[in-house]
Amino acid sequence: MPDTRHSADCADSAHSAHSARPLRIAVIAGSTRDGRFGPVVAGWTLGHIQQREDMSADLVDLVETPLPTVFPAFGQPPAAGTEELLAAVSPRLAEADAFVVVTPEYNHSFPASLKNAIDWHNKEWHAKPVGFVSYGGISGGLRAVEQLRLVFAELNATTIRETVCFPGGWAKFDTDGAATDPASDAAAKTMLDQLAWWAHALRDAKAVRPYAA
């Protein structure tokens, strides 16, 4: 009878190393509007992730990495230059274990630039958790987040219950980009802790059984 102990030990060792690797978190700055406040909120979010030993952060700024806005007809090749633009974003989303979406609220919803980035991708979102940091007027961007939950559910992603929001966000940061209310920092930790739990759980599950949409 073959001895399977060595193979099992190797598999356990590989799984342990995989589980120990810091989680790759893609922070998506969703606003591309002139004069946007998003970089302040995204920078603050990035700082919280960088303080953690269990995570590494990659900022995907949709201004610095613009994506095509015209989709090809079904069955037709994409327009010239499309692949080059996607190459600056798609591999980074594919490599991410989880996402934090930083979004404002425009007209009771989220920016068209963010929806465009979501729609250019599909399997990159599959079986991965998504957290949200929102900002805006009196609602703090929460109406944008509620709509994004529906979109990501369609893409087989898991959205995190805990969110961070900044009502009247422009007045909630000092000149150094730090949040003025300590409760915001506490909320960020809670959201990231929850994101980490889901990211580890889903990454480990996919290592055992690849996800099939």
Image (cartoon, grey):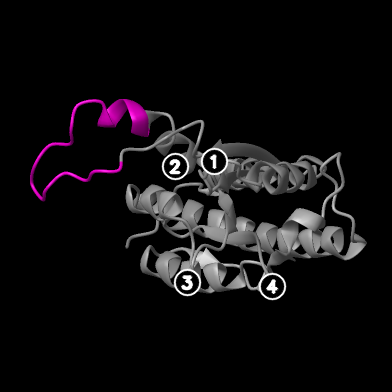
> x, y (%) of residue 47?
78, 42
The residue shown at (12%, 37%) is 77
Q: Residue furthest left?
A: 75
| Disc 1 + disc 3, Cβ < 8 Å | no
- Give the mark nearer the N terminus: 2 vs 3: 2
| Disc 1 + disc 4, Cβ < 8 Å | no
- SS at circle 1: loop
Callout 4 crowding tier (Cα within 10 Å): few <14, some 14–19, many ≥20: few
Q: Give yes or no for residue 52 being in the magenta stretch.
A: no
Q: Residue furthest front?
A: 35
Q: What amino acid does circle 1 point to?
A: Asp
Q: Is residue 91 visible?
A: yes
Q: What amino acid does circle 4 point to?
A: Ile
What main secondary structure does the magenta stretch of the protein show?
A: loop
Residue named by callout 4: 138
- SS at circle 4: loop
Residue 88 located left or right of residue 197 = left
Callout 1 crowding tier (Cα within 10 Å): few <14, some 14–19, many ≥20: few
Q: Which residues are magenta?
A: 69-86
The residue shown at (8%, 42%) is 76
Cα gap from disc 1 to disc 4, whole angstroms: 21 Å
Point out the image quarter for the C terminus: bottom left
> x, y (%) of residue 32?
50, 43
Label annotation for residue 155: none
